[in-house]
Amino acid sequence: ETGVTQSPTHLIKTRGQQVTLRCSSQSGHNTVSWYQQALGQGPQFIFQYYREEENGRGNFPPRFSGLQFPNYSSELNVNALELDDSALYLCASSLQGSGNQPQHFGDGTRLSIL
Amino acid sequence: QKEVEQNSGPLSVPEGAIASLNCTYSDRGSQSFFWYRQYSGKSPELIMSIYSNGDKEDGRFTAQLNKASQYVSLLIRDSQPSDSATYLCAAPSSNTGKLIFGQGTTLQVKP
């Protein structure tokens, strides 16, 4: 069974740039959720994709966007990067779109904004 | 009031002791609860899920759920230095389905 994989592992960008992070879900999982984790904090929900549709969104501005592909892999795009966007970005996959299903995380992408 | 609350710690216990980690939640509609372990610099790893009131045991771990008190706990028996990590409690919002995490409790197990 293949687990959740994310790329890249680390990324350094400057303010105003755009970034795309990628995630492949665990085999058999059709739901992908994205989280932002600042140092010393719990993960904060950005949005979830279920069957290629956005299925819930947290308190993040529209410059955070995403999509899901037919093979259930997903991308997170962030435009006009700000210093506060520096964080660990986590992707988690699960069965179905319900929050009652356990979510399994990838290793994350550490994004640093200079 | 935060939706899922944990004491940030650190909680320090000697090797071999029982570590008790606590979590409260505000959404009475939440039906499932999860404990994740996160080592420094790593991603969260699911260690326990609990859906019903009472205790659920898995090896050295026991999760306890009390829906009337809106309280979830994780007990780690025979704590080992390798258990030193941050433990995250999570519950889905009954309205949106999104998973809400507490800020995590840092556990230090001293040899």
Image: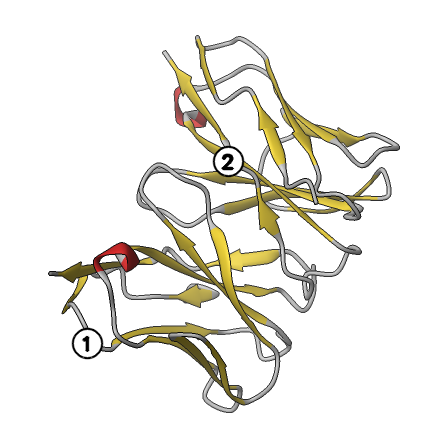
Amino acid at pointer 2: Asp
Viewer-nearest of discs 2 and 1: 1
Q: Which residue: 58% across, 37% down?
A: A60
Residue B78 to residue A28: above or below: below
> Which of the two residues, B82 or A67, is positioned nearer the viewer here?
B82
Q: Which residue type does callout 1 highlight?
A: Ala
Here the colouring is: secondary structure
User: Chain under label 2?
Assistant: A
Name the chain under label 1.
B
Is the residue A36 above or below the residue B15 in the image?
A: above
Residue that mark 1 sits on: B17
How far is disc 2 from disc 1 in space, using C-alphas? Answer: 30 Å
Q: How many circles with numbers are drawn on the protein?
A: 2
- At horizontal 34% and vertical 46% (from top left) the residue drawn is B39
Q: Are marks 2 and 1 on the same chain?
A: no
Q: How far across and down, in percent of the image, does residue A30 sit?
A: 80, 46
Q: Position of residue B1 (x, y in %)?
A: 41, 67
**Residue A58: mark:** none
**Closest to the observer: B2 or B24?**
B24
- Label 1 Cα neighbours within 10 Å, binned few <14 / some 14-19 / many ≥20: some
Asked if residue B103 is positioned above or below residue A10 in the image, the reply reads: below
Q: Tag 2's secondary structure?
A: loop
Percent across and percent down for residue A103 are: 62, 54
Point out residue B49 in the picture as x, y percentages from the top left corner. Answer: 56, 70
Camera-nearest residue between A54 and A109:
A109
Label 1, secondary structure: give it: loop
Task: Report the disc number at residue A107.
Answer: 2
The residue drawn where x is 12% and y is 60% is B110
At a point 45% along the width and 26% down the height, the residue shown is A85
